[in-house]
Image (cartoon, helix red, strand yellow):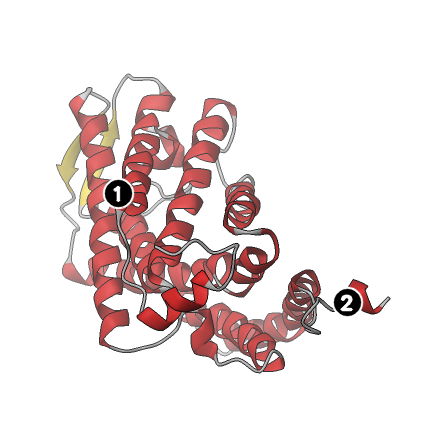
């Protein structure tokens, strides 16, 4: 029975830590929901509550790492100059790849872009705020504690496969997720998860994954005006989809359901695969001590 719960080093097995995390997340809903409803009853807008769900997730993560007698920084949150630089680089990569995917759709006659008369700098700033907390939440959830426990337990590729499938399937309930859109969007979202996981592995930090996620969503939605994962956003541009198949344009789901998003994901995965990374020396040394963690 002892071996069921403890590994050869006498530590709780990674699978149990994942179950503990899941149980705490489930339990947190019984606090989050009434707190959120109370604040909305006091007139706080739903948009203003974007940081709240991230705060609850961060609290659950903190509890788990403290139970393991590790600092929160072990998850990939070290708010220093390096973290800020990698956040900026990641944001640029996300923005550039989203623009490249849309440029390909435009080049084959799939879309016409027009400036929106109602555009404003305030709209861009609002979009950055919304998608920053979306990225913080999703990257902490999918590339944080659970991802790292899976890496330690089943290895990098097992962790990438499991959470890649989880990330893609978590979008199946989104609007317009059907037909060819379901196929291409699932492929793109799975590759996107692999890409983001690789960004973590090459940096041992959540900064670059958060930045890529932020830049990708923000450029699609509040800059170029496309739907993001099936949800509409007003941007600086107003895209008009032309008479091309949905697997080309992405349809009403957005560019993530386009073959060109799959192409740019694959290209960025190749770039990150070839990159040696920027992880601190101590993180690289620690990775070399663990057979499941290939050093950058």
In the depicted structure, whether residue 56 falls above or below residue 120: below
Mark 1 residue crowding within 10 angstroms, few (<14) / some (14–19) / many (20+): few
Q: Position of 193 compared to 18: left or right?
A: left
CA distance separating discs 2 and 1: 40 Å
Q: Which residue is disc 1 drawn over? A: 271
Q: Earlier in the sequence, mark 2 or mark 1?
A: 2
Residue drawn where x is 20% and y is 28% of the image: 104
Label 1 secondary element: helix
- Per the rendering, the mark at residue 233 is none
Residue 105 in sight in this render: yes
Q: Nearer the viewer, residue 20 or 36?
A: 20
Q: Which residue is disc 2 drawn over? A: 5
Label 2 secondary element: helix
x and y, in percent, of residue 90 in the image: 26, 56
Q: How many numbered marks appear?
A: 2
Q: Quadrant of the N terminus?
A: bottom right
Q: Position of 196 compared to 270: left or right?
A: right
x and y, in percent, of residue 9 in the image: 67, 71
Q: Quadrant of the C terminus?
A: bottom left
Residue drawn where x is 23% and y is 27% of the image: 105
Quarter occupied by residue 266: top left
In the depicted structure, whether residue 167 falls above or below residue 59: above
């Amino acid at each position: 029975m002892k071996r069921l719960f403890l590994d050869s080093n006498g530590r709780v097995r990674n699978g149990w830590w994942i179950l503990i995390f899941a149980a705490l997340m489930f339990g947190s809903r019984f606090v989050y929901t009434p707190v959120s409803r109370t604040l909305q009853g006091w007139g706080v807008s739903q948009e203003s509550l974007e940081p709240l769900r991230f705060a609850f997730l961060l609290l659950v993560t903190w509890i788990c790492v403290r139970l393991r007698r590790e600092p929160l920084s072990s998850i990939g949150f070290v708010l220093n100059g390096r973290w800020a630089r990698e956040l900026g680089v990641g944001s640029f990569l996300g923005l550039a790849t989203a623009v490249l995917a849309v440029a390909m759709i435009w080049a084959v006659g799939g879309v016409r872009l027009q400036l929106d008369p109602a555009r404003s700098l305030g709209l861009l700033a609002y979009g950055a705020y919304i998608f920053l907390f979306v990225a913080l939440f999703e990257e902490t959830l999918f590339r944080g504690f659970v991802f790292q426990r899976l890496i330690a337990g089943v290895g990098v590729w097992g962790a990438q496969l499991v959470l890649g499938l989880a990330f893609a399937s978590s979008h199946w309930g989104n609007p317009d997720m059907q037909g060819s859109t379901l196929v291409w969007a699932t492929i793109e979202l799975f590759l996107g998860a692999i890409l983001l996981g690789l960004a973590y592995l090459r940096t041992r930090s959540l900064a670059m994954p958060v930045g890529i996620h932020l830049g990708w969503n923000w450029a699609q939605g509040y800059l170029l005006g496309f739907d993001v994962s099936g949800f509409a956003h007003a941007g600086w541009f107003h895209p008009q989809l032309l008479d091309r198949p949905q697997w080309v344009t992405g349809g009403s789901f957005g560019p993530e359901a386009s073959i060109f998003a799959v192409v740019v994901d694959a290209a960025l995965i190749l770039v990150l695969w070839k990159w040696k990374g920027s992880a601190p020396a101590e993180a690289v040394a620690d990775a070399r001590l663990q057979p499941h963690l290939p050093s950058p």
